[in-house]
Amino acid sequence: MGEDTKRDISNVIEEIDSAYKEFSDYSYMNADYPYFARMAVGQFRRALGDPDLTREDLERILRKGIVKYRQTYNDNPLHSGKNWVNFVASYMATASNANDIFYDFLNVADSHNNNA
């Protein structure tokens, strides 16, 4: 995935981050950022080019990206400005690409087994 994809993902993350912060400032919310972001699964599907992305997959990949950010920078991503957005967007693009490769491998292996 290229820079355009990372930029698209960053834009979605920034948009959801703004909504999350605004909503949580004015109302009690029993949801963290990855859970809240599930509402935007359609936007993430378009940004990632993955029409099969589920809300659960989105939440999982965001959680993993945020954990990687914390491990790398020892910082709370939701208070770090644009740096965490770009990091998580890159992580999501890379992870999504790795999943595509993994699923392609499974499809080839399955095809091979069916032809044997």
Image: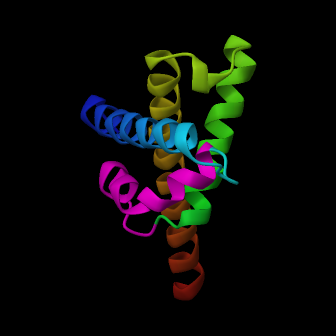
Which residue is nearer to you in this view: 94 or 33?
Answer: 33
Q: Is residue 22 above or below residue 43?
A: above
> Which residue is at a point 64% across and 51% down the rendered structure image?
29
Is residue 67 in the magenta section?
A: no
Which image quarter: residue 75?
A: top right
Magenta span: 33-52
Q: Residue at x 29, y 29 (%)?
A: 3
Horizontal side of residue 17 vs 77, given as left or right = left
Answer above or below: position of 32 versus 39: above
Q: Quadrant of the C terminus?
A: bottom right
Across and down, in percent, residue 100 comes to 47, 55
Residue 19: name its quadrant: top left
**72 left or right, relative to 100:** right
The residue drawn where x is 54% and y is 76% is: 112
Question: Looking at the figure, which quarter contains the N terminus?
Answer: top left
Closer to us: 28 or 16: 28
Residue 49 belongs to magenta span: yes
**Image x and y of residue 106, in percent:** 57, 67
Image: 89 above or below 101: above
Direction left: furthest residue:
4
Relative image position of residue 35 (x, y in whole percent): 62, 54
Q: Position of residue 18 (x, y in %)?
A: 42, 35
Q: Residue at x 60, y 48 (%)?
A: 34
